[in-house]
Image (cartoon, helix red, strand yellow):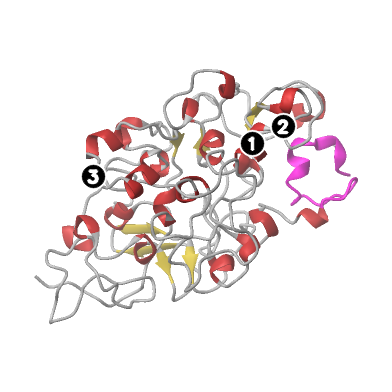
Amino acid sequence: MKTSQGGVVLGLVLLVLGALCVDIAPAAVTGDCVNCHTIHNSQDGQDVARDKDGDPLGTAQVTLLNSDCLGCHSNMEGSSTIVESGAIRIPIVLTGSEPTDPPEPGGSSSNVLAGGNFFWVADGDDDKGHNVYGLRANPADSTLSFAPGGGVGGAGCDDCHGTLATSTSGCRGCHYPAHHQDDGNSTDAVDSGDGWYRFLSGAAMTAARNPDLSRDSLMSLEGVTGLEDPNWEQSPGASHNTYKGTTVQYMSATGNGNVPYNSIGAFCSGCHSNFHHEKNDSDGGMMDASGAWIRHPSDVVLPETGEYANYIYTALAPVAYEDVTAAGQGIVTCISCHRPHGSSQPNMLRWNYDTCVNGSTDSECGCFACHTAKDGIAD
C-alpha cells in the first residue's frame, strides 16, 4: 500500500482528526481511507506517522492514523487556514506564517478561523494562546503553572482542570475526536448523535486518563451543542458558528453530566471556574445573578433593553443561544470575548483592548458591540 509522505504538512490542534477526509459539503467523513489511515505505519522502512513539521512521530498512532492532531491540522508552509486537496478541505489553526487577525471582512485565505490560531503561542508568546502539548519543545507557560481562574489544583486534578501542556492532556484536554460522524451543517444542530459540536466533550480528558474505558461509556458523556459554519468563519458574515448557551445557575441545580446543559460556557468553566462562577459580591458569587459584578458575567442573557438592545450579531463579539436553531435572545459566554485556540491579542482576546476608549469610533472594539452607548458612533 503506497502512502504519500509529501505535500503540505497539515494540522489543527483541537479539531477533528477525521477532517482530512471531509468532503467540500459538510457531511459524514468520505474519501480514501489512506487520506487519514495507515495499515502498518511502515513504508519503505520508514514510519508513516508524521508530526506537524513532517518529522517521524516515532510511534504508531491510535486508530491507525497517519498523524496526531497537530500533524493533521497545521499548515507550517504558509498562512492559509483552510487547505484544499481535491475535494478535501482541512481547517487549520496552526500556521507557519502569521495569519490575519482580526479576520478581514469579506474573507481572506489567511483569516483565523472561529477558534483562532496557535501561531502566536507556538512562537513563544504565552499570553496569546492555550499552551497545548506538541506546539513547541517546552509547552508549559513561562509564568502560569495552572489555568487562570482555576478552582482546583494538585496531583490528579491538573491534567483535567489545570493544564493542556502535558502528554496526557494536550488536544484531548478539550476534544474527543475518535469517531467519524457528521459534523453538522449550517441548519442542523450538532449534539450527542454527531459526537458533539467540534468534538467538545467530557470524554476528552476521561479518555486520556482512563484508556481502559469502553468507547460506549466515553461517548455517553455530555458535550457542547452547536451549529457549524461550512467555512469555519474564514469569511465572517451571515454564516457563522453558533454555540449553545444557558442561563441556568447550574452550580445549585442538577447539571447535565460533565457539561451542564451542553453549553460552551460550562465547558470552559471546567478549567476556569472562578472566572465563570464567581461573578458578583453576593453570597460568594457562585453563579448568583444578583449583587454588584466583580467579574464580567458569563452564561447570562444579554438584555434587550437600553444600550444592549442595539446589539447586532457579530463574529467580533458573538453571543450564544439556548436554542441554536432558533437563535432568539443572546447569551454572553467566554468566547464572546476570547478565541479559545489563540489570537494576536493578549489574553486571547478577539480585539485590541487598548483601543477601547469611551467615545471612540473604533468599530473593531468588541466591547462596543454590546455596550453600544459607550462608543462615539451614532445609533
Residue type at the position of mark 3: Asp
Q: Nearer the viewer, residue 29 or 60?
A: 60
Q: Residue furthest left?
A: 1
Q: Which residues are magenta?
A: 356-377
Q: Which is more foreground, mark 1 or mark 3?
A: 3
Residue 212's disc number: 3
- Which quadrant of the figure has residue 182? top left
Residue visible at 29% across and 72% down in the picture: 57
Total numbered circles: 3
Answer yes or no: is residue 99 visible: no
Please state the horizontal and vertical placement of residue 199, each as a whole percent of the image: 38, 43
Cα distance, mark 1 to mark 2?
7 Å
The residue tagged 2 is: 279
- Tell me: residue 349, above or below residue 272: below
Q: Amino acid at mark 1?
A: His
- Disc 1: CA contacts within 10 A as few (<14), some (14-19) or many (>=20): many
Q: Is residue 75 left or right of residue 365?
A: left
Quadrant location of the C terminus? Answer: top right
For image coordinates 62% across by 67% down, the residue present is 142
**Amino acid type indicated by mark 2:** Lys
Q: Neighbour class for label 3 at 10 Å: few (<14), some, many (≥20)?
A: few
Q: Helix, strand, or loop for circle 3?
A: loop
Q: Which residue is nearer to you in this view: 367 or 217?
A: 217
For image coordinates 85% across by 49% down, the residue present is 361
Q: Mark 2 or 3, which is nearer the eye? A: 3
> Neighbour class for label 2 at 10 Å: few (<14), some, many (≥20)?
many
Helix, strand or loop at label 2? It is loop
Mark 1 = which residue? 276
